[in-house]
Image: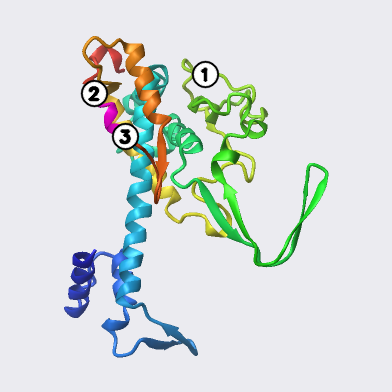
Amino acid sequence: MEESLEKGRQNLRHESAGPGNLLSALVHSLGEAKETSTYRKEGSTVSLLSRADALGDIYVFSLAGHETTGNALTFAIYLLAAHPEVQAWVQEEIDSVYGNCDGSPYELFPRLKRCLAVMLETLRLFPSVIAVPKLTQQQQRLQINGREYEVPRKTMVILNITAIHTHPKHWGQDSLVWRPSRWIQSSRDRTQPHGQGMKEKEGAIGEDEELLQPAAGTFFPWSDGSRVCPGMRYSKVEFVAVLSTLLQHHHVVPRRHAGEGKEDARQRTLGVLGDCKFAMTLYMADARRVAMCWTPRSPEGRR
């Protein structure tokens, strides 16, 4: 982080604009790069960032922009390895999309809906952040199950993401099951409430497939409202690009121990997924207990 900040400062000293990114914007806002710690803009005084502020922002950008998406990919790869039928369902879409048009994964992102469904379903059960703190700005009254509750002003409220993401009321009786197909709807079932009436669609690839739009307040791994994560779109594109590139030419399976069968290896993988801890983000306590093996797909397995 220190090196990145120093490089940006050097570009500024030599009047080199450098890349137009968040780092360059931070450097331009550094108080130490100016003669004073404030400046006048449109009749008001604007405070400049200190070096500690800039380093803190760089840390947050790195954590939010890399660790969260990286963790989601790790969970998704383990889940796909434990569910080969879902992996084949996703590869069916990848083969269809990549086989019928040219373009990079980033350009083809809108068509890779099943890949995105894998991300959404993974974050539903394994969100990077498991709770969102909020502070009430004024007194509020809530009606819950026929009873009225009063929430005083300046009360800290913790939204339990995992509880909401797995509530059967919102996600059906299989709410604890990892099932990416619940996020895919066709024109004939768009009227179905999410979590209900959804079936695996291994054989259905077409333009009529659309992503499910969850009811408000039932899915918010990137938070929601005015505080929604500004990198949400970026993380979706990044996840889909990486996953589609990996699965286009390879299968992923758990590496088996000597004398271990496929089902035993699968159960061992599910056991690792069920043993999670939370620090800055949610992570598997000991992912090294199961190594992943990437094997090339046969030409017959790709269109």
In the depicted view, which residue is nearer to us: 242 or 160?
160
Please tell me whether mark 3 sits on a helix, a strand or a loop.
Answer: loop
Q: Residue at x 32, y 63 (%)?
A: 58
Q: Residue at x 23, y 16 (%)?
A: 257
Q: Does 34 sit above or below residue 54?
A: below
In three-dimensional space, the C-alpha distance between marks 1 and 2, rounded to whole angstroms, equals 26 Å
Label 2 CA crowd tier, 10 Å (few <14, some 14–19, many 20+): few
Q: Quadrant of residue 274?
A: top left
Residue 39 got which mark? none
- Name the residue carrying label 3: 286
Q: Does 213 sit above or below residue 58?
A: above
In three-dimensional space, the C-alpha distance between marks 3 and 2, rounded to whole angstroms, equals 17 Å
Q: Which mark's residue is nearer the viewer, 3 or 2?
A: 3
Percent x, y of residue 262: 32, 12
Is label 3 in contact with label 1 (beta carbons under 8 Å)? no
Magenta-colored span: 286-292
Q: Residue furthest right?
A: 146
Q: Answer left or right for 57 relative to 42.
A: left
- Name the residue carrying label 2: 293
Q: Residue at x 35, y 24 (%)?
A: 269
In the depicted view, which residue is nearer to us: 241 or 38?
38
Q: Which kind of residue does numbered mark 3 sit on?
A: Asp
Q: Residue at x 56, y 19 (%)?
A: 199
Q: Earlier in the sequence, mark 3 or mark 1?
A: 1
Residue 200 got which mark? 1
The colour scheme used here is: rainbow
Is residue 97 at least partly visible in the picture?
no
Q: Quadrant of residue 218?
A: top right
